[in-house]
Amino acid sequence: MRRLWNTSGVSGTTTTTANSVSLSTTQTSVKSDNSDSATVTATVLDANNAAVAGVTVAFSASGGQLSAASATTDALGQATVVFSAGTTDPSNRTATVTATVAGVSPVQIPIIVKGSTVTISAIPSLTIGGAAGADQATFTVTAKDASGAPIYNTPITLSVAGSGATPGAATLTPTSATTDPSGQVSASITATSTGIVTVTVTGLGATATQNVTIAAGTAAFAITSPASSPATLSTNTDLTVTVNAPSQANVTFTSTLGTWDGGTSSLVTKQVSGGVVSAVLNSTTGGTATVQAIDPLDPTTYATLTVLISAPSTAAAQIDLQSDVGVLAPSTGGTQNQATFTATVR
């Protein structure tokens, strides 16, 4: 209250009224483990923007914890409370602190609560069918607060969906659970089709994802198409060679005849996707080609295919006949002389 003096010497008084309130904070975020705090200050001014002392400011928060429900402004027109994450909710979130003064519209300021995490332990690649591997794996989800301490009884949601250029399919068990005293949830993934799937877990306002490759299970690295060797190929046509590579990242294709993928090279390295990789062979000349698929990181892992390349029968334009001897002597007694003739059709 301010005291005013009039010219007649008779004293009088007038009341200073709050006209506006503003909020500020010493930090815009606090840790989810309640290990730090932010000081929130409400500043009350009158219509002339002068500080108003002795005004009660009511504080509230949408989450977290406040040191008091109200405070009175000092000579600078300021009232303060302390905000922290509290101990009841360790999740990542944004809390809103509200300051209310009688006769003035309430004002708000957001403070972020952060630092809690959910993580997924490593999930191995899966295989379907064959003798090479299992179609199921187990993994662990762990929930921790900002200090890295495990959080008990936290709800966790789990989901899986196909992803990437070759999406696969799988199921999860369970799809929701609460963490044990170690802050963990155990789960299993079961593959149902080849490709890539993404496992997603959410909890504490945090999300973690992990990609899992599902391959076709076989006993070994192998060329699966063409299914038989030797394979046949006409000149100037394409032959797709497919390799099952359950544990390889890349496969190198080589051939003694022809070129790969429409290029000019007899060697090409392709990236494996979903445990499978293919390359296309084409040759302008006939002959017997030896095709190999090789693991570039382990050349002792390879598969071989023989391809008989010939021109279409309607395309024959020339035939050459050769003998392995120039002169053939007559056979006499027990000695028989013979000649071998070779015909080459082009």
Image: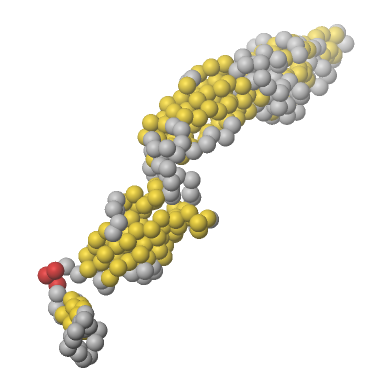
Would residue 119 be found to the left or right of residue 303 on screen?
Answer: right
Q: Residue at x 70, y 15 (%)?
A: 87
Q: Is residue 219 above or below residue 298?
A: above
Q: Is residue 192 left or right of residue 237?
A: right
One can see residue 57 in this view? no
Q: Is residue 344 above or below residue 228?
A: below
Q: Residue furthest right?
A: 9
**Quadrant (top left, top right, bottom left, bottom right) of the C terminus:** bottom left
Name the foreground residue: 212 vs 295.
295
In the rendered image, which quarter contains the N terminus?
top right
**The image quarter in which residue 165 lies:** top left
Q: Position of residue 149 (x, y in %)?
A: 71, 23
Q: Whole-percent x and y of residue 93?
A: 61, 23
Q: Nearer the viewer, residue 116 or 9?
A: 116
Quadrant in the picture for residue 308:
bottom left
Q: Residue at x 52, y 55 (%)?
A: 298
Q: Is residue 146 left or right of residue 138?
A: right
Residue at 71% across, 16% down = 86
Above/below status of 318 relative to 69: below
Residue 168, image x and y in percent? 39, 36
Question: Residue at image x 29%, y 51%?
Answer: 227
